[in-house]
Image (tube, rainbow, N blue to C red):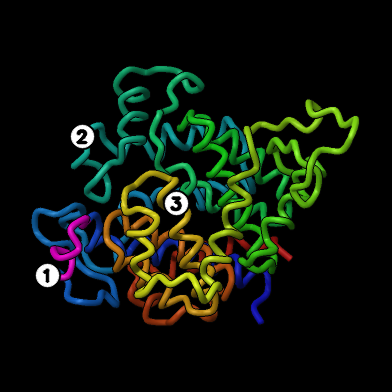
Amino acid sequence: MSNTKDRAKGALMGTFIGEALGVGPHWYYDLDALREAFGEWIDDYKTPKKGRYHEGLKAGELSQQGWIVKKMAEYVVENQGYDRESFLKTMDDSILPYVHDNPLKGIGGYTSQMMRHLYQARKRNNEPWGEIASIADTTESLERNIPLAIYYANDPKALANHIAENTAYTQRDNMVGSLTVAFNVVLAALIKGEALDSKLSNTLMKKVYRKELPFFAVTSEGLNKPMVGRDVSSSEGLFASPDGLLSPSHMARAASDPSIVIEPAWKASIVYGMPCAIYHMLPASYYLAARFKDDFESGVLHAINGGGQNQVRAMLVGALIGAQVGFEKIPKRFITGLKDHESLSELADRLVAHLI
């Protein structure tokens, strides 16, 4: 049985592993082309093909999103937590100079829509933080905040408030913010030993009713009708609804219901959607992480073999399953095949050192 520190380390290392697994086979929406390039089953790190995204990287290396997660983990360790001014300084001094407003430039060979927008606003135009958040509906803020979820796993209220603020600086859509916070709340719960099952959402909703999480909830406990005489305005939160906390248990039910069949499991990418938007990424990730809750290898490999935005899918599945099985149960070949795995492991140890 893994302990909190081991599960927390598993979450971070699982994120890095999933990201690196996606470097070679990233963004093949034509599954026949994916199989032609890498064979019928991708089972390890791969070097990108010539002319593809991340060309120039080698098998086992991180691309830009993994690098940003690493920089965020370093920031959290160095500052012993999060505060607004030091985070924005880190973005300006240590992250944005290494990205670009050209999609095929920047560290890792590709810069995402959200990061291109920030680079243009801050480095080209010197626009102020607080006025430049992107409309991107993707998962960059969610990924970047995984180290914060790990660090604040003991304090879900602080976790949710910090991640909500942090996300708002870079992505302004309220739904993106809600789902970003919800994923990281789920991740922290798994680190603390909760199960990704049909009961998890009810556990998280109790925190909403106690106002420990900033979600609006008009219902009473158990999602029943509001209590007579209840002042609905008193339950209003930062986010419009708690649905981002409810969906993980629905995905877990789907994974455990024998009458719901997705075979092979990588076809979850087709069922829930292969594109990059957060509302495609999360359902497939929750489904695979619940289905393979004790099997890190199967989970991340089915995430990769589903094509499309498989890099993010594998990152999120790696984090969620890593948080369930712990670092010690991640297959060693995924660790030793990861470039700079020793320094990444040491960083993870420093990030989780205070957890109990």
Instruction: Measure how far apart labels 3 and 2 are at the Cα level.
Output: 21 Å
Within the magenta stretch, is there residue 18? no
Q: Residue extending furthest left?
A: 50
- Judging depth in this view, the residue of 199 and 107 nearest the camera is 199
Residue 8, horizontal then vertical, whole percent:
60, 65
Q: Is residue 35 left or right of residue 95?
A: left
Residue at 28% from the left image edge and 71% from the top image edge:
45
Q: Residue at x 61, y 72 (%)?
A: 6
Residue 228 in the image: x percent, y percent? 89, 34
Q: Name which quarter of the figure residue 350 lies in.
A: bottom right
- Mark 2 and mark 3 in contact (Cβ < 8 Å)? no
Counting other residues with Cα less than 10 Å from the Cα at mark 3, is it few (<14), some (14-19), or many (20 or more)? many
SS state under label 3: helix
Q: Of the residues under marks 1 and 2, which one precedes in the sequence?
A: 1
Q: Which residue is mark 1?
A: 36
Principal secondary structure, stretch drawn in magenta:
helix
The secondary element bearing badge 1 is classed as: helix
Looking at the picture, tell me which residue is in the foreground, 112 or 56. Answer: 112
Between the residue at mark 1 and the residue at mark 2, the CA separation in whole angstroms equals 29 Å
**Mark 3 — residue?**
69
Residue positioned most to the front: 259
Q: Identify the element where label 2 is drawn.
A: loop
Q: Which is closer to the viewer, label 3 or label 1? A: 1
- Quarter holding the C terminus is bottom right
Q: Residues within 10 Å of mark 1 (few under 14, many from 20)?
A: few
- 32 drawn magenta: yes
Q: Amino acid at mark 3?
A: Val
Tell me where residue 263 sits by quadrant: bottom left
Residue topped by disc 2: 102
Q: Provide the residue span drawn in magenta.
A: 28-35
The amino acid type, in three-letter code, at marker 1 is: Glu
